Amino acid sequence: MTSTPQLSISISPHLTALAMIADALAGRRRGLPEPWRRALSSRVGRQGHQAVRPLAAPGCSVVPDSLVPRTPISGDVSVQTQIAALRDLSPDNLIEDLDQTFGSGPLPAHWRPAAERPGRWLDGYASALADVWSAAEPLWRRARPLLDREIRRVGVAAVRGGPELLLGALNGRIVHGERGLLIADLEPSTYELGERRIVLVPMLAGKDAIIVSLDHEEAVWIAYPVPGAQTLWRAPAAPVPDELSALVGPVRADLLGALGRPMTMSRLAADLQITPSSITYHCDRLGAARLISRERRGREVWITRTERAEALLELFRR
């Protein structure tokens, strides 16, 4: 690529969810903080864990076309859209796609479970995506200021010039120079970008995570960690305890402060050294105020701060 690249940006959270799956569940570690890796892994059931393993098999990044992430080049793509595409894919279509991708010989070992029980595999993959997003969506909402800032940064580079500098600063695995755009860890092939535009997709992912598609005839897209994401991985600044306690009570103030990421009721009770019955009572009150949401998964109940709670806590951090 020798001409100046044309840039645009897409806010498509489905790639954040996929990057988190690869890091936390499939073993392709790219810098996701360990507490989040554990939280996401515990949120997904056994079937989901088994389904996502082929997506990050060591030394092999080839996946059937039907499982490639929805392209963000013509608009933003939601996680729900990606999940619906998986739900709509028939088992027969997956089998056909596996045959076309890997030829008539034996399938790679990591794809054989998908071929043996394609319906179950598709359901497990879609469920894993939904489970991961249910844990990550509150973090995505908190990242809105970072995403808005990135939209402005890309816009300035596209309008005023300097896209080459922007591309070179996206990630340590991406370099833009005289030879064009060089991306580490792609399959060993040469790609001609020509006059195609580049769509940038900021993600909430580990610092070394990138997802790239170079096959579309109109554009290529690059998903990369949004700058400043490290401020979200850390525990949020604690609100002023006396002021928040005066409003909601000391126990509920501590409970809200502890929910920097989704947690189970049992973990909350242990961390705060409160009996399960007391946790249930206070969560009932916070739920009635729409400050937390609850979701039962098997024997565990998961607690998440709502957007309303995030706004309340922000008031007390100022």
Image: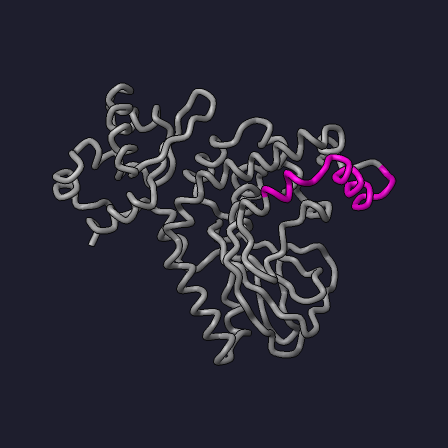
Q: Quadrant of residue 72?
A: bottom right
Residue in the picture at 41% in, 30% down: 295
The question of residue 96 being in magenta is answered with yes
Task: Describe residue 271's horizontal placement relative to residue 214 as left or right.
Answer: left
Q: Position of residue 13 (x, y in %)?
A: 51, 51
Residue extending furthest front?
288
Which quadrant is the N terminus positioned in?
bottom right
Task: Describe residue 62's horizontal placement relative to residue 82 as left or right.
Answer: right
Residue in the picture at 68% in, 67% down: 218
Q: Position of residue 251 (x, y in %)?
A: 19, 31
Task: Describe residue 278's horizontal placement relative to residue 7 as left or right.
Answer: left
Specify the principal SS of the magenta part: helix
Residue in the picture at 73% in, 57% down: 188
Viewer-closest of 73 and 232:
73
Q: Position of residue 113 (x, y in %)?
A: 71, 30
139 versus 212 height, above or below: above
Q: How is the image coloured?
A: one colour
Task: Describe residue 164's horizontal placement relative to residue 236 as left or right.
Answer: right
Residue in the picture at 47% in, 30% down: 42
Q: Which residues are magenta?
A: 83-105
Viewer-closest of 82 and 128:
82
Q: Quadrant of residue 261?
A: top left
Q: Position of residue 76 (x, y in %)?
A: 54, 57
The question of residue 65 being in magenta is answered with no
Which quadrant is the C terminus positioned in?
bottom left
165 versus 206 height, above or below: below
